[in-house]
């Protein structure tokens, strides 16, 4: 199973449909972070900006769309998010988390 397949499976288990605006942006963001964890030290520059350029939008749109996906996942499957985080989450995680 490729990393893209794994992420799509996780998104499905979190109740995030493929037609949700920002789905592709979120996938690309996670893939960039997984490929190089150092990008997490400068998320706006090294992740949001790269994804925004590829998707033809502003970095603020990327952050907003990821936040929307996080809240959707939290609403649909908070226990699965806790499993992924490997710790109890009392609220939806921040975009950078």
Image: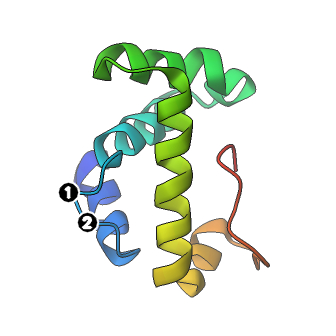
The spot of residue 27 in percent (x, y) is: 36, 44
Quadrant containing the N terminus in the rendered view = bottom left
Helix, strand or loop for disc 1: loop
What residue sits right under mark 1 in the picture?
A: 19
Q: Residue at x 70, y 61 (%)?
A: 93
Label 2–label 1 contact, CB within 8 A: yes
Number of labelled discs?
2
Left or right for 41, reference 11: right
Helix, strand or loop for disc 2: loop
Q: Residue at x 46, y 45 (%)?
A: 65
77 in relation to 2, above or below: below
* The label number, if any, that marks residue 64 in the structure image: none
Left or right for 37, reference 11: right
Q: Residues within 10 Å of mark 1 (few under 14, many from 20)?
A: few
What whole-number distance in Å separates the C-alpha atoms at marks 2 and 1? 5 Å
Residue 91 location, quadrant: bottom right
The spot of residue 82 in percent (x, y) is: 64, 77
Q: Nearer the viewer, residue 28 or 34?
A: 28
């Amino acid at each position: 199973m490729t990393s893209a397949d794994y992420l799509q499976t996780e998104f499905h288990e979190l109740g995030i449909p493929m037609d949700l605006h920002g789905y592709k942006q979120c996938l690309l963001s996670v893939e960039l972070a997984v490929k190089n964890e150092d990008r997490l030290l400068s998320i706006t520059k090294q992740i949001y900006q790269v994804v925004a350029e590829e998707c033809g939008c502003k970095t603020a749109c990327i952050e907003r769309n990821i936040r929307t996906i996080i809240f959707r996942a939290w609403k649909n499957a908070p226990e699965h998010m806790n499993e992924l985080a490997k710790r109890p989450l009392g609220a939806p995680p921040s975009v950078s988390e």
